Amino acid sequence: MNPDEYCRQKAVTSGSSLYYSLLYLPPERRHAITALHAFCREVKEVVDECSDAQLARTKLAWWRLEVGRLFEGSPGHPVTKALQPWTAKYRIAAEQLNTLIDGKEMDLAQTRYLDFAGLARYCNHAAGALELLAAGIFGYRNAGTLDYARNLGTALQLTSIIRNVGEDSRRNRIYLPMDELKKFEVPAADILQARYSDGFVELMKFQSARADDLYRKALIALPSEDRRSQRAGLVMAALQRATLAEIERDGFRVLTHRTSLTPMRKFWLAWKT
């Protein structure tokens, strides 16, 4: 298995939202973004699959060393080997890759966020940095596209947080801001024990409206001359907004259910977008 095949198997499973968002990309850009997503998946799995926090930190430190080896010209992992041809072409910097690792280290150090300002910082590390890199790989002419990418990254991460509230709680993580739980009278114990309430539904409506507003801001910020080159990101936005709407129609049963779009609907949204 060559590095590109490894990355494809790691990051772009058939039927996933990423799979449909990359359908219309030219091969070179598709290889680059697939390698980038595979890198993100590798570091995410370190945190999700290691029950020992110190071991996870050791593994993330190894990835930082591997990023250094990538930019020294001697990568050893299939993912960094797949990234190597594109770092100069698409201006991928070591600092940006290390920011993605920083986001995963935040998961090891913090399982609660006091307010949205703290959560927004996490979203920037977890997804904003990724979308800035993706915008460079897709190509842009107007620097305003970077504002689009930042807003899109936060919106995508918030959608993931909403969708995975139950799954994250089983890892003792609550990403919803604590001050907003208090505002809607939702004890953290209700989330950890999967107890639904009217307050929980109102809390989730509030989070969903915030994410949807960020999608709108992202689309408004995207300059018209870059809309075609950024179509992969626009497809992802369409898929995730549709997922968000489906979660709301389902009554925000996110503590016990995981909502997904059918492959046919994903294909239709990707084609239409």
Image (spheres, helix red, strand yellow):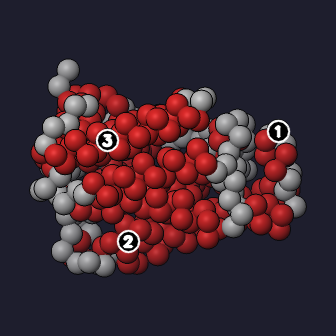
Q: Helix or strand or loop: what does disc 1 sit on?
A: loop
Mark 3 vs mark 2, CA separation in Å: 31 Å
Q: Is residue 136 in sight in this rendering?
A: yes
Which disc is residue 65 wearing? 3
| Disc 1 crowd, CA 10 A, few/some/many (<14, 14-19, 20+) | few
Which quadrant, please, contains the C terminus?
bottom left
**Which three-letter amino acid code belongs to the residue tagged 1?**
Gln
Which quadrant, please, contains the N terminus?
top left
Q: Tell which of 183 and 213 is nearer to you.
A: 183
Q: Which residue is mark 1?
A: 193
Q: Tell which of 245 and 128 is nearer to you.
A: 128
Q: Helix or strand or loop: what does disc 2 sit on?
A: helix
**Where's residue 164, x and y in %?**
62, 44
- Seen at 64% across and 68% down, the residue is 116
**Where's residue 56, x and y in %?**
51, 34
**Where's residue 242, x and y in %?**
51, 54
Mark 1 vs mark 2, CA separation in Å: 37 Å
The relative height of residue 45 versus residue 160 in the rendered view (above or below) is above
| Disc 2 crowd, CA 10 A, few/some/many (<14, 14-19, 20+) | many
- Seen at 20% across and 36% down, the residue is 75
Label 3 or label 2, whichever comes before in sequence order: 3
**Which three-letter amino acid code belongs to the residue tagged 3?**
Leu
Which disc is residue 148 wearing? 2
Mark 1 vs mark 3, CA separation in Å: 39 Å
The relative height of residue 183 versus residue 79 in the rendered view (above or below) is below
**Which residue is situated farthest in the top direction here?**
1
- Seen at 49% across and 47% down, the residue is 104
